[in-house]
Every structure is written in structure tokens, then in C-alpha cells.
Image (spheres, rainbow, N blue to C red):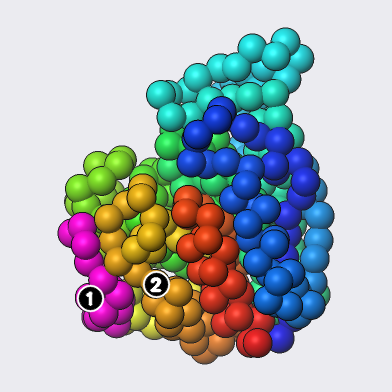
């Protein structure tokens, strides 16, 4: 099994300030753990390219793309940070990081669909699943997974793709972008109520939203996945699967109050991979979303990658 690993040093340049949980050290923790455990030897490493604006406009309003890129460029040139919301700030390194982050998802999609690799993981930041069609929020500027999914559909001509989101927070941005697009099935679980306080009522019939209460543990989540995700995924028969891989439902992560552990992420990845092998020639592109306890994040990503790479 050939698993590509996409990242770029410029993804570390996006910095929203001291003490912010979405910090550059997240990528360092992942890289260090992969080297320490020897998992890196099994991966096919690639530098993430810069995404083209045309790719962004398949998921986002063209006016939004122009406006946010202008803001990012101005901050880069002038050095004055720009706050999108109380938790999300454009800094001098945000432009290149955001372009590389979305670029990784698109390049990974191309690599998997060309058959150069079996699947791919994108260790990138900023994350993406809160970015709506026309709004940056929740640490996110461009919706990396939605951009990649639309690239697979509109450029490569796939007819059905699935998006799996297991972040502790509801992927409201992804839902906003793909609701009603019957070429896409989105399945997710998320703590509820919790930021962004959405998802209780799906925006389209192509959604399987599983809001779960705080302090839910892995056994409860696994049962819901078997009951609610798996039948819909099997019926849909996706030709490719995209994963919004947030690891902040881990019991050690303070941004949520759920109780998952590494074994749960391993199990979830196995179930997703089984669907991909039956219907999608094993084609998976996974993109990092949340996960803010550095140790738990690194261990959970490793568990995820062991399944993808079959090691």
C-alpha cells in the first residue's frame, strides 16, 4: 500500500499568536512522532504546491476568494494582522500557508486518481472545514476537503464522492458548500452543542449528521457509525472518499469534551477504508482538521496513518 504524505514548511508560517491552540507546533508534533516511531519510512513524502484560484472557486464564491486573498496579501506586505473573527486571524504567513494547505488536497487528489499512490494524508494548516462558501471562520480560510472533492468531480469527472468528517466540531463550512449536491454524500459525527452550534438539522438530504453529547466515548460513537454511516455509504457507493480528519474528539483534547482514543481513530479509519476498497478502488484523501493536544494529536495521526499505509 502506497500512502502519500503532503505537507510544506510554509504551512508552519501561519501564526495566530502566542497561546493559540491552532499553532505551528501541531505539524512539528506529528512529524517528530512519525520519525520517532519509524512510520515515516513507509510514507511517500511530497511538498504541497500552491493551489490555483480556479480550484478555490469551485467550492467558494469567486468574490470571497478575491477578497480574502487580497486581505492576506495586504497583511503579508504591510505586516498588520487582520482578524476575521475573535479566534481567526490573518498573519504575515497565512497567505502561503492557506494556498499550500488547499494545494495539498488538490495535488493529493490528482496523485490518487492517477494511480501514482493508493491514498494520501495532508498534514497541513490552516484547517478548512469551518470555511463556508463565502466566509472564513473557526481557524479556517479555505475549505480544503470541499475544494478537493469538487476538483475530483468537476475536473476528473467522478460522479460520486463521499466526505467523512470526524472532527469534534461540526463541519458547517463543508455542509454549506455541498448541501444539495447529490454527487456528494457527507457523513459526520460531532459534539453537540459545541462550536459552531450547528448540524442538528442537516441542510440537505445528502448529509448524515450525528450530533453526540459531551463525554461520549468510543463505543457509543462506533455503534452510531455502524448504524448510521455505513448503510448510507454502502448504498451511495462513492468512487472516492475524502476525510476531514480532526482528532480533537480525543479524551485528552481540551477544545472538546469527548472520550475517543487512538484505537477509536484506528477503527474509524478501518471502516472508511473498507468502503473505499469495495467501491472506490481504495482511493482516499485525508486532510488534517482539528487536534490541539500535541501528544494526542501525534499519536492519533499515527494510528490513522498505520491503517492507510497498512503498517
> Secondary structure under badge 1?
helix
Q: Nearer the viewer, residue 138 or 153?
A: 138
Q: Position of residue 73 (x, y in %)?
A: 71, 20
Q: How many marks?
A: 2
Residue at image position (22%, 75%) is 220
Numbered range of the magenta stretch? 213-227
Q: Nearer the viewer, residue 268 or 37?
A: 37
Q: Position of residue 141 (x, y in %)?
A: 54, 35
Which residue in the protein does label 2 denote?
Answer: 261
Q: Seen in the image, is 158 located left or right of residue 258?
A: right
Report the Cα–Cα distance between label 1 and label 2. 13 Å
Q: Position of residue 14 (x, y in %)?
A: 65, 34
For marks 1 and 2, the one nearer the N-term is: 1
> Secondary structure under badge 2?
loop
Quadrant of residue 78 in the image?
A: top right
For the stretch drawn in magenta, the main secondary structure is: helix
Quadrant of residue 125 in the image?
A: top right
Residue at image position (45%, 74%) is 262
- Report if residue 228 is visible in the image: no
- Report if residue 164 is visible in the image: yes
Which residue in the protein does label 1 denote?
Answer: 220
Residue at image position (56%, 28%) is 17
Amino acid at each position: 500500500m502506497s500512502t502519500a504524505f503532503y505537507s510544506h514548511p510554509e504551512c508552519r508560517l501561519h501564526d495566530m499568536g502566542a497561546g493559540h491552540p491552532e499553532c505551528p507546533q501541531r505539524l512539528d508534533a506529528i512529524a517528530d512522532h512519525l520519525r520517532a516511531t519509524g512510520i515515516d519510512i513507509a510514507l511517500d513524502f511530497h511538498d504541497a504546491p500552491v493551489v490555483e484560484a480556479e480550484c478555490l472557486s469551485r467550492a467558494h464564491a469567486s468574490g470571497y476568494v478575491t477578497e480574502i486573498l487580497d486581505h492576506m496579501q495586504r497583511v503579508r506586505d504591510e505586516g498588520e494582522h487582520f482578524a476575521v473573527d475573535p479566534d481567526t486571524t490573518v498573519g504575515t504567513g497565512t497567505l502561503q500557508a492557506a494556498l499550500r494547505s488547499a494545494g495539498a488536497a488538490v495535488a493529493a487528489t490528482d496523485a490518487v486518481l492517477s494511480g501514482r499512490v493508493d491514498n494520501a494524508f495532508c498534514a497541513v494548516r490552516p484547517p478548512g472545514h469551518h470555511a463556508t462558501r463565502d466566509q472564513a471562520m473557526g481557524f479556517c480560510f479555505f475549505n480544503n476537503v470541499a475544494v478537493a472533492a469538487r476538483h475530483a468531480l468537476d475536473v476528473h469527472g467522478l460522479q460520486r464522492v463521499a466526505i467523512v468528517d470526524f472532527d469534534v466540531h461540526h463541519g458547517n463550512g463543508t455542509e454549506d458548500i455541498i448541501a444539495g449536491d447529490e454527487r456528494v454524500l457527507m457523513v459526520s459525527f460531532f459534539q453537540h452543542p459545541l462550536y459552531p452550534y450547528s448540524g442538528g438539522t442537516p441542510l440537505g438530504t445528502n448529509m448524515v449528521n450525528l450530533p453526540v453529547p459531551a463525554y461520549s466515548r468510543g463505543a457509543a460513537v462506533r455503534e452510531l457509525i455502524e448504524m448510521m454511516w455505513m448503510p448510507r455509504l454502502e448504498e451511495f457507493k462513492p468512487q472516492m472518499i475524502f476525510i476531514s480528519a480532526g482528532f480533537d474528539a480525543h479524551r485528552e483534547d481540551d477544545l472538546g469534551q469527548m472520550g475517543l482514543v487512538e484505537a477509536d481513530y484506528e477503527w474509524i479509519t478501518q471502516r472508511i477504508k473498507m468502503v473505499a476498497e469495495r467501491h472506490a478502488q481504495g482511493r482516499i484523501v485525508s486532510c488534517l482538521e482539528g487536534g490541539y493536544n500535541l501528544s494526542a494529536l501525534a499519536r492519533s495521526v499515527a494510528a490513522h496513518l498505520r491503517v492507510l499505509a497498512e503498517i
